[in-house]
């Protein structure tokens, strides 16, 4: 027992340290390199060069905070979906939930921008949530018809491709220059994040995270099987609806502000389980959130700096690191 506690403390410490390191690197590294001394001068108000302060506090810091929060939300959504479907490769991107959210956000933004109306943060989240729920509902209907989780996953991937194709069609043939810029968002990016966005993200993700954490005990019972959960006093129908709503809300928040980001929801929960050597929800929920933050901060840093000044989409980098992990999971599952 003491050994497990020590492992948890060390693992949490590693994740927190990595978050701090990647946030600092995100602030320092970019088209303009900012030294530690200049950062400290800006924090204390000593720095005379206002440009550095603007770059740090108006561009890089909100982007880093958003990457951390949205990465955590995506990993947590993946963990909830994997628990719901009892499948290690279920995730928002694979099941088409993120793509459904992306499609409805794009359509809503096109409709509003053509009328000269800019959609606010809440409007984006609502549109993304509706899109997520529509795709999630379709996946749930398929789960009653399709036998075998492999076919369900394939169906989810097909839904994802259809939604992505329609979104690309809408974005490509849009007339307004603002709508054309949606192409970059549709590939997945944390760029252009403002503090008002961060506040909205923090409120939505924070409340959802707290509610998910309160479900740690029924989640643990649900992992043992529906019969065990029923005997433990869990209302299965209500609980399954909650899992769908919470995972869809987290996925919607990510898609609304950063576009669809692939493989984080699948890869991170698996990596966290390996790191902590446990599947207990009370440990996994905060650990997945921190792990998702670390993963997205790292990938965003690479996306910005790898081929600077050209910026890659975050989804490209997450796919490079996440896809091999999914392959490993599938091979291990095949062996078992």
Image (cartoon, helix red, strand yellow):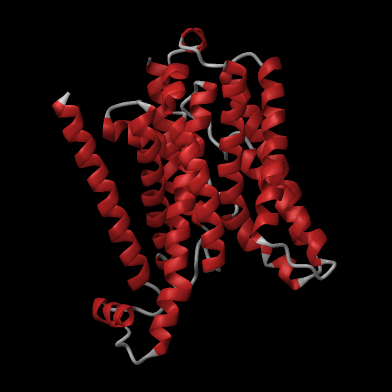
Q: Name the foreground residue: 95 vs 120.
A: 120
Q: Is residue 50 above or below residue 309?
A: below
Q: Name the foreground residue: 164 vs 210.
A: 210
Q: Name the foreground residue: 69 vs 105.
A: 69
- Residue 83 visible in the displayed image: yes
Residue placed furthest toward the bottom: 48
Where does residue 63 sit, x and y in percent of width and height?
A: 47, 64
282 vs 137, left or right, is left
Q: Quadrant of the C terminus?
A: top left
Q: Quadrant of the N terminus?
A: top left
24 vs 202, left or right, is left
The quarter holding residue 300 reads bottom left
Where does residue 325 sit, x and y in percent of width and height?
A: 40, 36
| Residue drawn where x is 19% and y is 31% of the image | 5
| Residue drawn where x is 57% and y is 36% of the image | 246
Q: Is residue 67 above or below residue 230?
A: below
- Residue 319 visible in the displayed image: no
| Residue drawn where x is 23% and y is 46% of the image | 13
170 vs 2, left or right, is right
| Residue drawn where x is 73% and y is 36% of the image | 134
Q: Is residue 194 above or below residue 255?
A: below
């Amino acid at each position: 027992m003491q050994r497990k506690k020590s492992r948890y403390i060390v693992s949490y410490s590693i994740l927190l340290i990595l978050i701090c390191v990647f946030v600092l690197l995100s602030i320092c590294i970019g088209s303009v390199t900012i030294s530690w001394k200049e950062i400290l001068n800006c924090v204390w108000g000593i720095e005379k060069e206002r440009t550095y302060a603007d770059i740090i506090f108006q561009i890089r810091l909100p982007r880093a905070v958003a990457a951390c929060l949205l990465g955590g939300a995506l990993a947590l959504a993946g963990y909830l979906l994997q628990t719901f479907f009892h499948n290690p490769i279920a995730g928002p991107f694979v099941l088409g939930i993120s793509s459904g959210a992306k499609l409805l956000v794009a359509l809503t933004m096109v409709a509003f921008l053509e009328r000269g109306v800019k959609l606010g943060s809440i409007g984006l989240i609502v549109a993304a949530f509706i899109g997520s729920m529509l795709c999630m509902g379709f996946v749930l209907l398929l789960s009653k018809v399709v036998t075998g989780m492999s076919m369900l996953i394939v169906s989810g991937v097909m839904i994802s491709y259809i939604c992505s194709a329609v979104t690309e069609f809408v974005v490509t043939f849009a007339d307004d220059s603002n709508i054309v810029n949606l192409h970059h968002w549709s590939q997945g990016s944390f760029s252009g994040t403002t503090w008002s966005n961060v506040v909205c993200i923090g409120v939505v993700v924070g409340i959802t995270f707290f509610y998910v954490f309160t479900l740690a005990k029924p989640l643990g019972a649900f992992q043992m099987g529906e019969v065990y959960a029923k005997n433990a006093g869990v209302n299965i129908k209500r609980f399954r609806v909650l899992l769908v709503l919470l995972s869809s809300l987290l996925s919607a928040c990510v898609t609304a502000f950063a576009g669809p980001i692939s493989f984080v929801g699948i890869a991170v929960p698996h990596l966290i389980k390996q790191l902590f050597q446990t599947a207990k929800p009370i440990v996994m929920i905060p650990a997945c959130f921190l792990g998702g933050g670390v993963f997205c901060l790292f990938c965003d840093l690479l996306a910005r700096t790898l081929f600077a000044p050209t910026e890659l989409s975050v989804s490209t980098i997450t796919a490079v690191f996440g896809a091999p992990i999914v392959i490993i999971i599938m091979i291990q599952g095949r062996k078992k």
